[in-house]
Image (cartoon, helix red, strand yellow):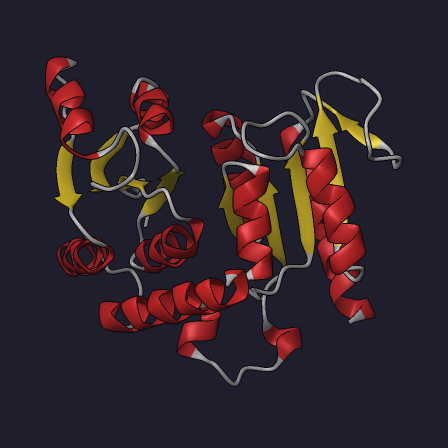
Amino acid sequence: MKSLREPEAAPQAAPARILVAEDDPLIRFAIAEALRDLGASVIEAATADEAWQYLTGGEPVDVIFTDYRMPGSMTGAELAVRVRRQFPALEVVVTSGDFEPCEWTEPIKKKPYPLIKTANDLMQLALATKQKG
Amino acid sequence: MTSPATVVLLVEGDIIARHPLAEYLRECGFTVLEAANGDEAMLALKTPELRIELVLADMTTPGSGFALRQWIRAEKLAVEVVLAGSIRKTVEGAGKICNDGPGLSKPYDHRLVLDYIRQAMARRERGQS
């Protein structure tokens, strides 16, 4: 929430912003806290719908890390496709425990994922996205 | 600071309100867990490793409010519960928790959080219509 305190702060001074969409709260807490420990600003969404709501509210995000199977009107894969279409500058990583054919044609991160390594990879991705502007 | 931060469970069904509220409480020095509904809150509270000490719950969130407080009592969980009936009350509750809490860094005034949430909600409503 640096934006509240310093509304005029330069964008490159802002931390990496990573949105985690995951309906299992214990998994979500774990990856969100791991990312915060690395200095990321983390937005937690419990469904793909919440993630979409947050994004379309105009809030800036660098990377989305979404689970595939979640309750609500869309899966994580559908969210990923929508994000690619409407926010092409945003990086999206989809994670899933099972590999059924879906709308998402890019590689899917296998669950369960190693926590610290995954958090590090997402941070690298977020910083690279930021640099591309 | 070697002692672990106090853990707060924030139960709020609207991400537009939940995220800034959680960030506000984090700036006060709390560890904040975010639950989007009563089921998530109960799952978190049933996990002793999370060491939740305080629950701030929006009463309009499904499964939250009195039902959640009753369940906490029935389970005899040693947590303090603050119920709030509106987004304004939830933000005020967060402000009070911050003032009474660790205060590692002094966060901005909780009324700024309320303004921010109201603006974001208005933007969303314009976007949907």
Residue depicted at x 17% and y 25%: B67
Q: Quadrant of residue B109?
A: bottom left
- In the rendered structure, the answer to whether residue A30 lies left or right of residue B71 reads right
- Percent across and percent down for residue A91 are 77, 52
Residue depicted at x 43% and y 56%: B16
Residue A40 visible in the shown view: no
Residue reaching furthest to the bottom: A8
Looking at the picture, tell me which residue is in the foreground, A102 or B47: A102
- Percent across and percent down for residue A82 are 74, 48
Looking at the picture, tell me which residue is in the foreground, A61 or A85: A85
Q: Quadrant of residue B25?
A: bottom left
- Percent across and percent down for residue A76 are 68, 35
Residue B51 visible in the shown view: yes
- In the rendered structure, the answer to whether residue B28 lies left or right of residue A61 reads left
- Percent across and percent down for residue A12 are 66, 75
Vertical placement of A53 versus A76: above or below? Answer: below
Task: Say which quadrant the C terminus of chain A sits in.
Answer: bottom right
Residue depicted at x 59% and y 49%: A52
- In the rendered structure, the answer to whether residue A8 lies left or right of residue B71 reads right
Task: Say which quadrant the N terminus of chain A sits in.
Answer: bottom left
